[in-house]
Amino acid sequence: AQSVTQPDIHITVSEGASLELRCNYSYGATPYLFWYVQSPGQGLQLLLKYFSGDTLVQGIKGFEAEFKRSQSSFNLRKPSVHWSDAAEYFCAVGLLIQGAQKLVFGQGTRLTINP
Amino acid sequence: NAGVMQNPRHLVRRRGQEARLRCSPMKGHSHVYWYRQLPEEGLKFMVYLQKENIIDESGMPKERFSAEFPKEGPSILRIQQVVRGDSAAYFCASTKTAGQETQYFGPGTRLLVL
């Protein structure tokens, strides 16, 4: 069955430090991969997505992610975090079923920023 | 250009009551997806609808839950005879077409069952 694993439930980094959030997926075909961010009490905002092509994907707010097929991974990175990056981050794989795409999400990684 | 709208944002119900959650997709979007987020968990797919059609309801609980997306008006997720385990955040997302498209999410409805 298709699944997404985010191994880190909670990560704390200092403001200005670099960040990497891990995501591993299990999917037989070429995956469509997404990273969403959820601020407390809010909906989900798309950070970036990978459909095909260049395996290094640039997103909003200075985030990037790299698709590595050999490792079944799609890790999210940011060179220098800001206090406003504190939020919950979700990795998802898109499954094309009956002509439409439904998303399978990981359990999320909560990011805390130390001043 | 308004995004995906959901109302109410917060809903409190007592056990046995009915909950109705509404979702208005983005302008020009005719495909709606509902997801449920239980506390401390990721979102789980419930149902996918196009106007007047349920396309995939494989994630819907077999009883008490139903969804519709009429020709006019918002999509409705209806939960009958709510139980405490239904307490969760319910999100809808919309796309313009089927296929591989970015889903745009609404702010969610947080349901609390007392």
Image (cartoon, coloured by chain):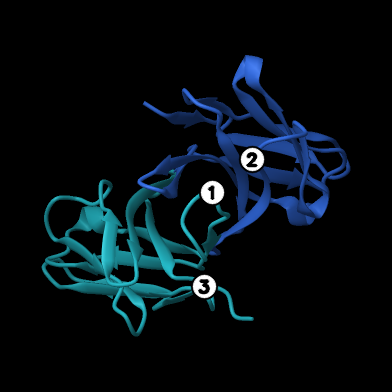
To the question of a shared chain for discs 1 and 2, the answer is no
- The residue sitting at 57% across, 74% down in the picture is B3
Query: For numbered disc 1, what is the local secondary structure?
Result: loop
- Binning the other alpha carbons within 10 Å of mark 1 as few (below 14), some (14 to 19) or many (20 upward) gives some
Q: Position of residue A110 (x, y in %)?
A: 60, 43
The 10 Å Cα crowd at callout 3, few under 14, some 14 to 19, many 20 or more, is many
At mark 2, the secondary structure is: loop
Q: Amino acid at mark 2?
A: Phe
Residues at discs 3 and 1 both on one chain = yes
Q: Earlier in the sequence, mark 3 or mark 1?
A: 3
Chain for colour cyan: B
Q: Is residue A93 above or below residue A83?
A: above
Please tell me how crowded label 2 is: few (under 14), some (14-19), or many (20+) other residues with Cα within 10 Å.
some
Q: How many marks overall?
A: 3
- Kind of residue sitting beneath label 1: Gln
Report the disc number at residue A104: none
Report the front residue among A81 and B107. Answer: B107
The residue wearing badge 2 is A51
The quadrant of the rendering that contains the N terminus of chain B is: bottom right
Query: Which residue is under mark 3?
Result: B4
Q: Is residue B104 visible?
A: yes
Give how far apart the Cα atoms at labels 1 and 2 are: 8 Å
The furthest residue to the top: A70
> Is residue A37 depicted above or below B11 in this figure?
above
Secondary structure at badge 3 equals loop
Asked whether the beta carbons under mark 1 and mark 2 sit within 8 Å of each other, the answer is yes
- Amino acid tagged 3: Val
- Give the label on residue B100, or none: 1
Badge 2: chain ID? A
State left or right for residue B33 relative to residue A74. left
Question: Which quadrant would residue B2 be assigned to in this image?
Answer: bottom right
| Chain A drawing hue | blue
